[in-house]
Structure formats: structure tokens, C-alpha cells
Image: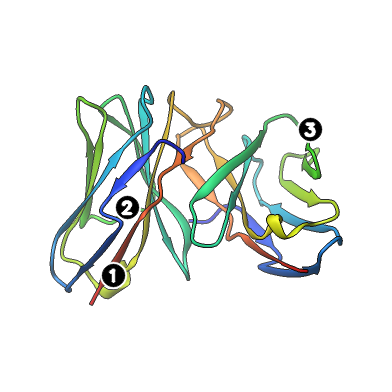
Amino acid sequence: GQQVMQIPQYQHVQEGEDFTTYCNSSTTLSNIQWYKQRPGGHPVFLIQLVKSGEVKKQKRLTFQFGEAKKNSSLHITATQTTDVGTYFCAESNTGNQFYFGTGTSLTVIP
Amino acid sequence: DSGVTQTPKHLITATGQRVTLRCSPRSGDLSVYWYQQSLDQGLQFLIQYYNGEERAKGNILERFSAQQFPDLHSELNLSSLELGDSALYFCASSPRLAGGPAYNEQFFGPGTRLTVL
């Protein structure tokens, strides 16, 4: 079953505001990946985090992996209308199975 | 365009029927993954193949089966279809066997939307 919980489910922000989505697990995660799915589109890989406490940045996006490797976050600074979509976290375990979070749907109001 | 192709784009069928979804991975990718995306269940991992061999199973029903052929394309067979099987089915591919701490970037195809009436 689902091993990663993601919050919030929906988020509406004014253009220019910041946005954060969180992934939480009750067990230690081997790694975490983040994907973005535009409306009507398919998931697109953004990044993978593996190390405890790891922080990676991609322009306005900041990804963090918790020290205990049980949570992760994606933060977008100064959202733009192009950021609209659903953001998923995912974990792959050593059994080569993949578990996706329920996703956070981001709406950016111009 | 991810380089992964899926056919058909849309499929409408009746309960009890059987359908086959097809996926061609990116050139050179050895791993293929199948996912089901529905409104109430999110993105569910079904199965993974690597170079023709099944390597991992997720929440795949017994009525569903898949295979990867020598040319690396894959097919997902869904039988005895039920209304609840209506969903978007994605195929994804990656160059190597993914899982655990390995680099896990997957390239998703455009999906097949299945509607069971």
C-alpha cells in the first residue's frame, strides 16, 4: 500500500507567492524522487534525493530530504503560472517497487 | 516529448472484455514500468520489467498481466474488465534497472486512457 503521505492535497496561491509541498513516511526512505505533472500531461522527473539532510536547488525550486530520511519537501519561490500542475513525491525501495505520494495540485492565480 | 510512445491514446470498451496496451520505451532503455492513475487511487505502480524479465510487482491485479518483448517494447493485458479499471495507464522507461538508492529517473509516456462502460 501507500508508504508516503503528501500534503496538502490542493494549494491555490497568488502569482508571486511561495509554495511548499511535503512528503512524510512512517518508515525510513531509501530515496525520494519528485515529479511534476501538468494538467492533461504525464509525470516529468524533477530530481532525486538520496542522502540524509540533502538539499538541492533548481532555479526557484528547492528540494530537501529530512535528516531522518522520513520526510521531504519541495519549495517553490515566487510562483509563476508555468508552475501549475500536480507535484508528486515517490520512493523506490530495494525491491524495485515504486510508491508515489497522493500529489499536491498547485493552482497559480495570475 | 519523452521519447516513450504508448498506443492507443484512448480506449473505450465494455465490462468483461480484454484489452492490450502497448508501450515502446526510449531508444536504448532496458527498463519498462507500468502505472495506473485514477482519481481516487493516485499513481499506482503495477509492474517493472528489465531486459525482458519481470523485476518487481506492485499493486497489479491477477486479471492484469504484462510482458516485455526481445525488442524491448512492452504490453499490458487487462482482462475481465470492470468499471473500476477505468483509468489512465502510463508506461515509463529508464536506461537501467531502478530501485533503492540507484538513480531512478523514469521517462513517462503520454498514457492510454481506458474507459470501461
**Residue carrying label 1:** B115
- Specify whether A94 is left or right of B113: right
Query: Do marks 3 and 1 share a chain?
Result: no
Q: Quadrant of the C terminus of chain B?
A: bottom left
Residue located at (22% from left, 26% from top): B71
Q: Nearer the viewer, residue B28 or B76?
A: B28
Measured Cα–Cα span from mark 3 to mark 1 = 42 Å
Q: For this rendering, which residue is in front, A77 or A5? A: A77
The residue sitting at 73% across, 29% down in the picture is A51
Q: In which quadrant of the rendered view does residue B78 lie?
A: bottom left
Counting from the top left corner in percent of width and height, residue A2 is at: 53, 56
Q: Are marks 3 and 1 in contact (CB under 8 Å)?
A: no
Amino acid under disc 3: Glu
Marks 3/2: CA distance?
33 Å
Q: Chain of mark 3?
A: A
**Tag 1: amino acid:** Thr
